[in-house]
């Protein structure tokens, strides 16, 4: 026969069940809370770089990239086709002006030079011979003219005598006529000699000038060949450092091919590139700041290429101090070209997140949280970025790269 369970026992069992359900529910709630906390975006404060928005001046600039190159560099080419027979230097050597770098085979070129020198000497002798022949021939003509003048004078005297004798009745008309004919004939002969002398003088002068011109052309050709032979000695044109040299003995060298490069590695300039979009904002003479190995150096824009290539415009910067011992050819540089000043603007410290003026999402500190804010940034220089809107003075802004975060709020772990 079943017994009835006392009321006290049933209430006790009911309380145990309620406590059990409450405990389970509490554990579930705690687990959910812990999971939510663990899923919330957080960041360690030590991983962040903060900057406080302030008000000040910004010397606006546009950014470019560049590299250090020697301020003076010269490519040495072979003026003739030849081959290398001796090498005197190696890459990296310091060379003095007129110091030989290598020797080319110049035997064939030397033979051609000597042949041309002989032709020049022969032409010079021809010119001298022509000059002497002209003097001799024209002197003979002048002598003939003098003889003809003397004969003409004698005949004129005879004509006067015959006319006198005829006037006193001692002569005859025929003799007068004969003397007059002889006198006129001699005058015509004298005139012909004068004309011949003038013509011969002009012709022989032109002929001599033509030969002298031929001689001058050969002398210029000889001088050019002499210069080519001198250049083929392959010497350094000035004190510099050898940065390239064709050093394979016996190797053929084509005319005009590069055989050596020398550079002045004590002085440097910066060859730079900037986006074509900003090319109009730079000009020759603009002040620049060049950052090399975390060191800043002053300079000015010295040259701008007139054409763009692959969307980039090239320009050169002349450094105020271009003899820094730590400089090496090829070192990368960040270049900031100044093009104006903005006074009394809100500004942020420049950092790696900034690329170009425009709209950005930046995180502003609000207690123990970071709040995303839409911000518009303007001009910049190597130190500061202009804040157009979206921030106010005193805001503490994260300037670290936050590209991995795309949430409105982030918890800060102190």
Image: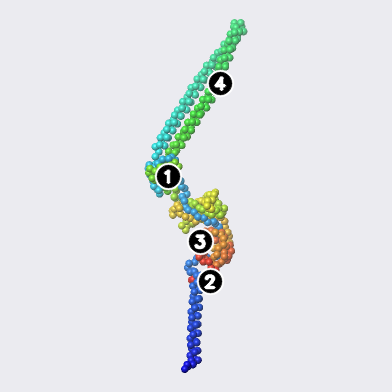
- Kindly state the secondary structure of the residue where label 1 is placed: strand
The mark nearer the N terminus, 1 or 4, is: 4
Q: Which mark is residue 70?
A: none
Q: Are marks 2 and 3 in contact (CB under 8 Å)?
A: no
Image height check: is 321 above or below 349?
A: above
Q: Between tags 3 and 1, which lies in front?
A: 1
Label 1 crowd bin: few (<14), some (14–19), many (20+), radius 10 Å: some
**The furthest residue to the front:** 1
How far apart marks 3 and 1 lie (CA) works out to 44 Å
Q: Are marks 3 and 1 in contact (CB under 8 Å)?
A: no
Label 3 crowd bin: few (<14), some (14–19), many (20+), radius 10 Å: few
The mark nearer the N terminus, 3 or 4, is: 4
The residue that disc 1 covers is 259
Residue at 39% from the left image edge and 45% from the top image edge = 247
The residue that disc 3 covers is 352
Q: Position of residue 281 (x, y in %)?
A: 56, 54
Q: Position of residue 104 (x, y in %)?
A: 40, 41
**The furthest residue to the top:** 169
Q: Which mark is residue 195?
A: 4
How far apart marks 1 and 4 lie (CA) works out to 64 Å
The residue that disc 2 covers is 367
Residue at 47% from the left image edge and 68% from the top image edge = 46
């Amino acid at each position: 026969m079943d017994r009835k369970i006392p009321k006290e026992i049933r209430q006790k069992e009911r309380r145990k069940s309620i406590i059990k359900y409450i405990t389970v529910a509490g554990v579930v709630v705690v687990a959910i809370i812990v999971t939510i906390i663990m899923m919330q975006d957080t960041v360690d404060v030590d991983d962040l770089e903060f900057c406080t928005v302030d008000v000040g001046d910004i010397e606006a600039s546009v950014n470019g990239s560049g590299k250090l190159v020697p301020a003076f560099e010269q490519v040495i080419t072979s003026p003739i086709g030849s081959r290398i027979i001796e090498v005197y230097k190696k890459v990296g050597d310091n060379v003095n002006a007129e110091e030989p770098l290598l020797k080319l085979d110049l035997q064939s070129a030397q033979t051609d030079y000597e042949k041309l020198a002989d032709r020049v000497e022969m032409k010079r002798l021809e010119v001298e011979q022509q000059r002497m022949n002209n003097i001799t021939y024209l002197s003979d003509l002048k002598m003939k003219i003098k003889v003809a003048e003397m004969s003409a004078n004698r005949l004129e005297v005879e004509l006067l005598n015959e006319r006198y004798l005829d006037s006193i009745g001692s002569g005859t008309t025929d003799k007068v006529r004969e003397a007059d004919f002889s006198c006129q004939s001699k005058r015509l002969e004298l005139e012909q000699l004068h004309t011949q002398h003038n013509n011969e003088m002009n012709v022989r002068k032109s002929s001599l000038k033509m030969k002298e011109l031929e001689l001058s052309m050969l002398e210029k050709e000889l001088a050019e060949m002499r210069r080519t032979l001198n250049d083929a000695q392959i010497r350094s044109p000035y004190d510099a450092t050898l940065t390239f040299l064709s050093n394979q003995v016996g190797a053929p060298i084509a005319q005009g091919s590069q055989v050596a490069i020398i550079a002045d590695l004590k002085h440097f300039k910066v060859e730079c590139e900037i986006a074509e979009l900003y090319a109009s904002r730079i000009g020759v003479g603009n002040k620049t700041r060049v950052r090399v190995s975390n060191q800043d150096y002053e300079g000015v824009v010295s040259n701008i290429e007139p054409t763009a290539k692959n969307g980039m415009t090239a320009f050169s910067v002349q450094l105020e101090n271009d003899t820094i011992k730590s400089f090496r050819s090829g070192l990368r540089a960040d270049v900031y070209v100044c093009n104006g000043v903005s006074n009394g603007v809100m500004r942020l410290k420049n950092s790696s997140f900034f690329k170009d003026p425009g709209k950005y999402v930046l995180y502003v500190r609000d207690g123990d949280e970071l709040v995303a804010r839409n911000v518009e940034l303007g001009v910049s220089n190597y130190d500061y970025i202009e804040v157009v809107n979206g921030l106010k003075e005193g805001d503490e802004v994260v300037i670290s790269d936050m590209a991995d975060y795309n949430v409105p709020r982030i918890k800060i772990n102190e």
